[in-house]
Amino acid sequence: MMQWSVAEDFEIPQNTSQKDITLLKKNIESIDKQLESSHNVWLKHYMSLKNYNELSDEINALKQEISAHSNPSHSLLYRLETLQKQQNLLKDYAKDPYKELLEVKSIDGVPQVKNPFLILTGYSFIKAMKEQQDALRANGKSLQSLLEIVQQKYTLLLELSFMDKSLEVANAIVQTQRIIEELEGAQKILETSLDVYMQESDNIAARLTSQIKNQVIKMVYVGVAVLITILLAFLLKLTLRKYIFDTDRIYTASKVINFLNITIIALILLFSYMENVTYLVTIVGFASAGLAIAMKDLFMSMLGWFVIVLGGSVHVGDRVRVCKDNTIYVGDVLDISMLRITLFEDVTLTSYMENRRAGRIIFVPNNFIFGTMFANYTHGGLKTVWDGIDFSITFDSNYKKALKIATDIGKKYAKGYTEMVRKQVHRMRDKYSLRNPNLEVRSYCMIEPNGFRISMWYQTNAYATLGLRSTISGEIIEQILKEDDIHIAYPTSKVVATGRDGIGGDIPELDSKALLAGGIEIHKLQ
């Protein structure tokens, strides 16, 4: 808004003369020019109201003139239409010419700063109220400046009226007085509105400032509490690493500490900014009912995580076996998260015999622990598993010698693992009801259609089953091939001179059908 500068004080002449009258009129004209060039919004609104009233008077006079003629001219009607359009543009100034300048926006939608995210909202609301106050003050200053200029003009006109008794001066005095009355009335309304708005906005600003201050203090307290929680969790992890040397247990304990730490932080934030905890209980109740149906697998996986972590059935680093859609996956546990177990599929006997694939990262949902066969090869500290090697020999072979060869080789390579598992099983008796199992190498001889099947079972490292199986298999074959009275059974063709020759020496003649069932093709020489 343009600030008015009060014109220089004019001296009231004591002796009335034509020169004094000319000086007064010149000063009045100077004020009028200053008003015209000022672009003061109050003056513009007043002039709009004045123009509206003048147009109304002119329209009424024109209507009387038209009604006096039985056949009014087209120019009169056109002029009436033009004046009415002009008046319609200024109709908003007829009832309340200073509405825009006196309008004070009601303070609605006052925010309640109940959490840190609303602090900026509170500051923005305070800033908006201050801008409204500044706008009202600027309007008040502009109005006061205009009043001072108009009152100065009114003073000069009164003095001129003592020297000039013309009707023109009298009309100017009336018009100026009317302007002063209009502006003074608007000034009183503005002052009252400004006082009311200032009082209300100051109260709201004080309340918002207090709320913002409380939130900042609460935020500091919550931040300190969260930092203390994180520090305690960190110190607890350091303590565990100092007194626990099992990396699997340290990993599991670290996971549990992280989960508890996050839960405590969530509860701190929840109870710090939740006004009514009963609302939380109600919301959680309804939300749980809906989510339990819509997200059953997710909740079952989270429940499975609790069972896995608290029950200790699976740990990071364990070798496990999972079956899904008739496909078997054997791998090492890399991670146990809230939703899934991450496995690394190693090259194992299962990979060799069934999958023919390895090296994949397998993600197993935790809810599999409830409905799927989940085998742990290294549970409870065990590092070994039973593995078996089978081979077949012919019926005329010395099966006792074959059994001894397989058993001796198995003991040779499995001796260390057998002693290891014996100690591990002894430690597991505190948790499980275990008898004294036979952990020595076992060999069995079974009759099969094609010969004797020798089955040798031994303890081996759960993480290196395939390597030891390869070594033992190779040495068994080497030892068997050195023996003349042991023959590996496999589909063969043998030429014999008579029905008694070729198998068992002194054994009575065998039925050719039985021989063919053993995979031996007979060719008699004639």
Image (cartoon, rainbow, N blue to C red):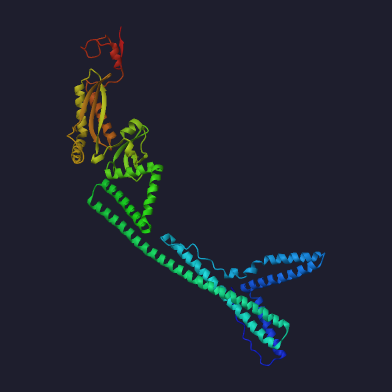
Q: From the viewer's perspective, tell me whether residue 335 is left or right of residue 201.
A: left
**Quadrant where the image shows the N terminus:** bottom right
Residue 19, quarter of the rendered image: bottom right
**Quadrant where the image shows the C terminus:** top left
Label count reads 0
Q: From the viewer's perspective, tell me whether residue 151 is left or right of residue 386.
A: right
Residue extending furthest toward the top: 526
Residue 520, quarter of the rendered image: top left
At 25% from the left and 52% from the top, the residue drawn is 240
Q: Nearer the viewer, residue 348 or 291?
A: 291
Residue 83 coordinates in the image, percent (x, y): 73, 67
Q: Nearer the viewer, residue 142 or 396?
A: 142
Q: From the viewer's perspective, tell me whether residue 169 is left or right of residue 520.
A: right
At 72% from the left and 65% from the top, the residue drawn is 84
Q: Nearer the viewer, residue 305 or 239?
A: 305
Residue 90 coordinates in the image, percent (x, y): 67, 67
